[in-house]
Image (cartoon, rainbow, N blue to C red):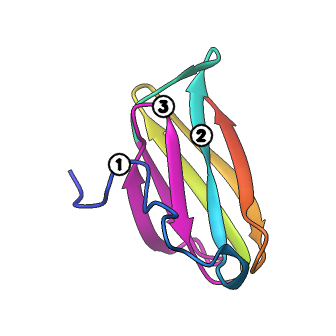
């Protein structure tokens, strides 16, 4: 188990306009699912990982650019590509 906070860091006190945020949720059949979400850079290299929260939520702070999110849940691994921009949180729903 990693030491990251479930769901990723919260936004309390964060100036969202100055950050690059990738966030979303992981679901199966419309219901939140527990697991992990990895953040991979443009070359596919591991950058970070967070466990999903009880509601399937995750959040990363990243540099602007193209990233891959990899949801790792029981019985499935799903990748999604996301383009992150500073000041505009990227909201990604991952259904497995």
* Residue 36 x/y as whole percent: 41, 46
Residue farthest to the front, as pictured: 13
Quadrant showing the C terminus: top right
In this picture, which residue range is highlighted in magenta? 36-63
Q: Which residue is mark 2?
A: 25
- Establish if 36 lies above or below 20: above
* Residue 26 x/y as whole percent: 57, 35
Residue at 43 percent across and 69 percent down: it is 48
* Residue 41 x/y as whole percent: 59, 75
Q: Which residue is mark 3?
A: 55
Residue at 55 percent across and 51 percent down: it is 70
Are there few (<14), some (14-19), or many (20+) residues within 10 Å of tag 2?
Answer: many
Q: Which residue is mark 1?
A: 6
Tell me whether circle 2 and circle 3 mark residues in contact (CB < 8 Å).
yes
Tell me whether circle 3 and circle 1 mark residues in contact (CB < 8 Å).
no
Q: Nearer the viewer, residue 67 or 13?
A: 13
Q: Which is more N-terminal, label 2 or label 1? A: 1
């Amino acid at each position: 188990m990693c030491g990251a906070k479930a769901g990723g860091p919260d936004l309390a006190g964060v100036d969202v306009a100055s950050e690059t945020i990738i966030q979303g949720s992981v679901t199966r059949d419309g219901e939140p699912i527990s697991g992990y979400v990895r953040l991979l850079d443009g070359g596919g290299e591991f950058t970070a990982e967070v466990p999903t929260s009880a509601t399937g939520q995750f959040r990363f702070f990243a540099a602007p650019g193209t990233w891959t999110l990899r949801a790792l849940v029981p019985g499935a691994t799903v990748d999604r590509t996301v383009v992150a921009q500073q000041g505009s949180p990227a909201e990604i729903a991952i259904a497995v």
